[in-house]
Amino acid sequence: MQKTLKSEIIGSLIWKFLERGGTQGIQFVIQIILARILTPEDYGVIAIITIFIALANVFVQNGLSTALIQKQDADEEEFSSVFYLSLLIACFLYCILYITAPLISDFYKDAILTKVLRVLSLTLFLGAFNSIQNTIIAKNMDFKKQFFSSVIAITVSGVFGIFMAYNNFGIWSLVYQQLCNQLLICIILLNTVKWRPKRMFSFYKIKKLFVFGSKILFSSLLDTLYVNITSLVIGRVYTPLMLGYYNRGNQFPQLIVSNFNGSIQAVIFPTLAKEQDNKDKVKAIVRRSIVTSSYIIFPLMIGLMVIAEPLIKLLLTNKWLPSVPYLRIFCLSYALWPIHTANLQAINAIGRSEVFLKLEIIKKILGIIILLITIKYGVYAIAVGVLISGILSSFINGYPNKKLLKYGYLEQVKDIIPSLLISLLMGMIIYSIFFLKLNDLLTMIIQIILGIIIYIILSYSLKLECFFYIIRALKNK
């Protein structure tokens, strides 16, 4: 890999990591404070509402924006056309959600859903408004701007949400926190990204972008629906309380993995898109992405599994303890994300969105079958089903690249085995600290410090290439 490209990737990755790490770190603290004040039922209701907004956002922000990043010579007319179309779609979908809100409320037998959905759906307009700014940032890999906008917005909106919670606004604390966050991001990006829509619109260019973007759009819709269908089912078949526990168990590993893996994903796609005609270089970038992210994520997930119970007790209080089993299951599931992400990003970047779409359809059919099998056995069984589906999906995602990049799944597994084995060994050692019968805080502190030391010593002793690569990259930067 050329030095300039390598420096660009590492620099962009650092800023993207800071953006995601900073915002999610602040969000993590805010959510801990709010979770101690609010109830699991409040979070269960918000989880239901968020599903419908997430589905609508797929049409507003996905597909065409990805096509703009993938297209190397996108012009001003294309950017402006996508901007106006996104706003039009947001308006249309908001009207649908506004009208259907009472029906959704009746389906879930919770009257508060109508008002909450109608208010929180306003974020669709805000997401549409800054979609092009985010696209330009990603295309230019200028994630420094995203870092500042995200950190400022999440901090201010978080303080606002906590203030409302302490003043007994209940679920509305979460609603207005999200609205405030999105509004602040729009205002800041409007001043930092010097792009403004022009008075131009081309159906022809939208149609050309749609050839690639439609497959990404449909794939994103399938993925969003599939990811959230479990919550839809739990909220309806069981209760918002159970959904609150389920989602809380999902939150901790998702926070960690989406931070690291999401940073890599945001940088790796435009990088791969630039090198799409050089398959050897694409393979090298994908391999580095899988090996590096696995090296970081594996020990984090194993460590989080070990400290799950004392962590929940200390941060969220005993009222959230039923979320511990879900947290541990999701740690195993999210550990596979580096393989998912790198393989799918490579397929999209080289322009094979039809392959991406086929994979998504196969995985979603498989996942729904597993959900239908597990649903009658309880929420815990549903979570196990998600894990099984994730394991099978990792095989499916890796299969096409054996032909496209000559980088098959078995070769990928071979690359990540060293990191997995030393992570498991580290996990077994720090688990033994529980037998000392110390208090929860002291136990957790010892486990975290000891885990880091053990992992570094094992990496150095076994001369793991990835460990020395990260050290060199940090020194060069």
Image (spheres, rainbow, N blue to C red):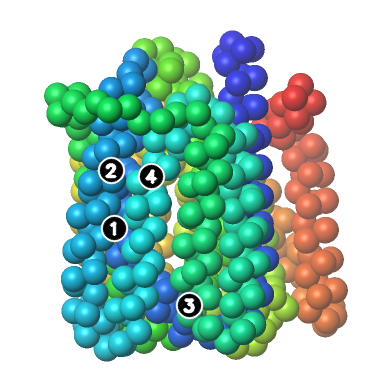
- The residue where tag 1 is placed is 55
| Label placed on residue 172 | 3
- Left or right of 428, for residue 321: left
Query: Is the C-beta separation of discs 2 and 1 under 8 Å?
Result: no
Q: Identify the mark nearer the N-term, 2 or 4.
A: 2
Q: Is residue 370 above or below residue 163?
A: above
Q: The residue under label 3 is which amino acid type?
A: Trp
Frontmost of labels 3 and 1 is 3
Q: Where is residue 409 drawn, in percent x and y?
A: 40, 36
Secondary structure state at the residue bearing disc 1 = helix
Q: Where is residue 30 drawn, in percent x and y?
A: 64, 67
Secondary structure state at the residue bearing disc 2 = helix
Can residue 356 be seen at all in this image of the molecule?
A: no
Q: CA distance from mark 2 to mark 4?
A: 8 Å
- Left or right of 79, for residue 19: right
Q: Is residue 224 above or below residue 293?
A: below
Which is nearer the eye, 166 or 464?
166
Q: CA distance from mark 4 to mark 3?
A: 24 Å
Q: CA distance from mark 3 to mark 2?
A: 27 Å
- Left or right of 200, for residue 468: right
Secondary structure state at the residue bearing disc 3 = helix
- The residue where tag 2 is placed is 86
Query: Is the C-beta separation of discs 2 and 4 under 8 Å?
Result: no
Determine which quarter of the picture holds residue 371. Answer: bottom left
